[in-house]
Amino acid sequence: MTVRKFLHNFEEYFCVWIMAVMTVLVFFQVVNLPVEFNASSRAKEQLATLGIVGSGDMTYVRKVLNAAALTYVAATLQAILTLLYYVMLVSGMRRSD
């Protein structure tokens, strides 16, 4: 086995390992999305129920908590796209063999 072949195999296995980790991460984030949206809606209810935020300020609270929940959507999309990048990278490596 030449050094070049060894490095190519190492790079491919490393990418496959990263794909496995990213798959777990994507799964966790997809499962976590409804939990985060539920937490934001419960926070809105609690803030209104306990009188911490007045009715005039609830518009702003909704905007902020919705934006906070959307950060999880952005993180999930980023993780999915990163996983797809590694899938394409590994499939390209195998085609060149």
Image (tube, rainbow, N blue to C red):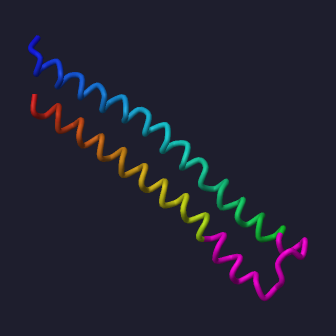
The structure residue drawn at horizontal position 63% and vertical position 56%, both measured from the top left corner, is 34
- Left or right: residue 96 versus residue 41 is left
Name the outermost residue toward the bottom. 56
The vertical placement of 65 against 12, above or below, is below
Does the magenta run of residues contain 16?
Answer: no
The structure residue drawn at horizontal position 10% and vertical position 21%, both measured from the top left corner, is 4
The vertical placement of 35 against 61, above or below, is above
Where is residue 53, by image quadrant?
Answer: bottom right
- Which one is nearer the viewer's eye here, 52 or 9? 52
Spot occupied by residue 51 in the image (x, y as percentages of width and height): 89, 76
Q: How many marks?
A: 0
Does the magenta run of residues contain 59?
Answer: yes
Spot occupied by residue 35 in the image (x, y as percentages of width and height): 67, 54
Spot occupied by residue 75 in the image (x, y as percentages of width and height): 49, 55
Where is residue 77, by image quadrant?
Answer: bottom left
- Which one is nearer the viewer's eye here, 7 or 95? 7
- Left or right: residue 63 versus residue 84 is right
Q: Which residues are magenta?
A: 47-66
The vertical placement of 64 against 35, above or below, is below
Spot occupied by residue 62 in the image (x, y as percentages of width and height): 69, 76
The vertical placement of 1 against 66, above or below, is above
The structure residue drawn at horizontal position 9% and vertical position 14%, both measured from the top left corner, is 2
- Which one is nearer the viewer's eye here, 83 or 53? 53
- Left or right: residue 16 versus residue 68 is left
